[in-house]
Amino acid sequence: MDKHELQAAIEHLHDRWHPCQEGEIATYIPELSKANPDEFAISLATTSGRLFEAGNCDRAFTIQSISKPFTFGMALEAFGQQRVSGHVGVEPSGDAFNAIELQNGTNRPHNPMINSGAITVTALLHEKYGDETFEMILDRFSTAAGRRLSMDQDVYESEHRTGHRNRAIAHLLLNFGMVHSEAEKALDVYFRQCSILVTSRDLAVMGATLANMGNNPLTGNSAFDLATVKSMMAIMFTCGMYDYSGEWAYRVGVPAKSGVSGGVLAVVNRQLGIATYSARLDARGNSHRGIEVCAELANSFGLHSFDCLNMGSSFLDTLL
Ligand code: DON
């Protein structure tokens, strides 16, 4: 039987980008510097439950900032849009993910994809759920991934020990009343959520869950409400790749989120979750190979939201 067109495409992309050595592994969280920069994985999961994979798709790595849209979704469901928007905005900042700054006038973080916004979101959850918060996050992420996930203790401890910049951000937020008084405890939950272990396959399924209106296409279980998914994807579209978000929208044109351990998650609404893993990052903290693979995939298959081939999200139906 002929190889499926998508399978052939990602194998080709994997071979093409494997030799690329551009970018650097993140070292500011010391434990992350142990990653193998040659490892490289591409996984696609469709809303009909099919998987296509190439490379090191079983390599577990920490989810890092790709956790942020998912905790944002949890906060929207727990508190509603109005309460959440009192604490965090929805504007791209145009600045680095770890910038120590708040929005002029409101003193809110610009958006929930940068560290200050994500720490605020986790603090909201912690204010409501206390010591249960991390387990609730792990449960929800596991539902989206379709299997029980766990946390990397070493990466967590490494960030907990060295995360002084995030500690400064948490205290700045506390100063402006954006987080409750247990800022340190909320930060601890944030460090833990960033240390949840996933493979590129898990991320692709989590993406397919978003693409599939919040329902995991492999298990049929609901992870997020329809209205929440819309908000999660909107913020991923405008802010998910930090100060590369505009260029990403231009080149790739789908909601996405990157993490500093090397993951990239992209979502083609109603069609696909796309995930890549490659630890070498560009200057903005996004995986270099990840960006290039997503751009080429989008180009070859007309995945860009405004590509004339992507008619009402139906183009890929013919392939799936
Ligand atoms: O808070 C941090 O700095 C990390 N735990 C997560 C940052 C991150 O993944 C940025 N992404 N590219």
Image (spheres, rainbow, N blue to C red):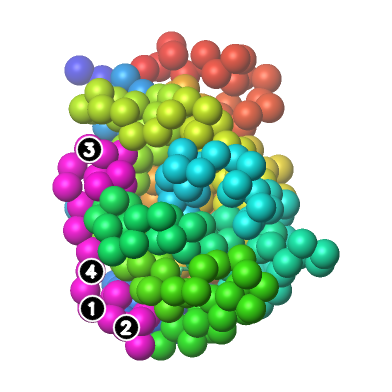
- Which residue, given by chain and number where applicable, does mark 2 sit on? 158
- The residue lying at 49 percent from left, 33 percent from top is 229
Q: Does residue 189 belong to the magenta stretch?
A: no
Asked if residue 20 lies left or right of residue 62, the reply is right
Q: Amino acid at mark 4?
A: Asp
Distance (Cα) linking label 1 and label 3: 24 Å
Range covered by the magenta-colored residues: 139-161
- Which residue, given by chain and number where applicable, does mark 1 sit on? 154
Q: Amino acid at mark 3?
A: Gly
Q: Give yes or no for contact between labels 2 and 1 (Cβ–Cβ under 8 Å).
A: yes
Counting residues from the start of the chain, the first of labels 3 and 2 encountered is: 3
- The residue lying at 61 percent from left, 19 percent from top is 309
Asked if residue 103 lies left or right of residue 136, the reply is right
Q: Give yes or no for contact between labels 3 and 2 (Cβ–Cβ under 8 Å).
A: no
Distance (Cα) linking label 3 and label 4: 19 Å
User: Which corner quadrant of the image does residue 283 belong to?
Assistant: bottom right
Distance (Cα) linking label 3 and label 2: 28 Å
How crowded pointer 4 is (Cα within 10 Å; few <14, some 14-19, many 20+) is rated as some
- The residue lying at 38 percent from left, 74 percent from top is 185
**Under tag 3, what secondary structure?**
loop
- Which residue, given by chain and number where applicable, does mark 4 sit on? 152
Q: Amino acid at mark 2?
A: Ser
Asked if residue 195 lies left or right of residue 266, the reply is left
Q: Give yes or no for contact between labels 4 and 1 (Cβ–Cβ under 8 Å).
A: yes
**Under tag 1, what secondary structure?**
helix
Q: Looking at this view, is 8 or 244 the one in front?
A: 244
**Under tag 4, what secondary structure?**
loop
- The residue lying at 68 percent from left, 27 percent from top is 306
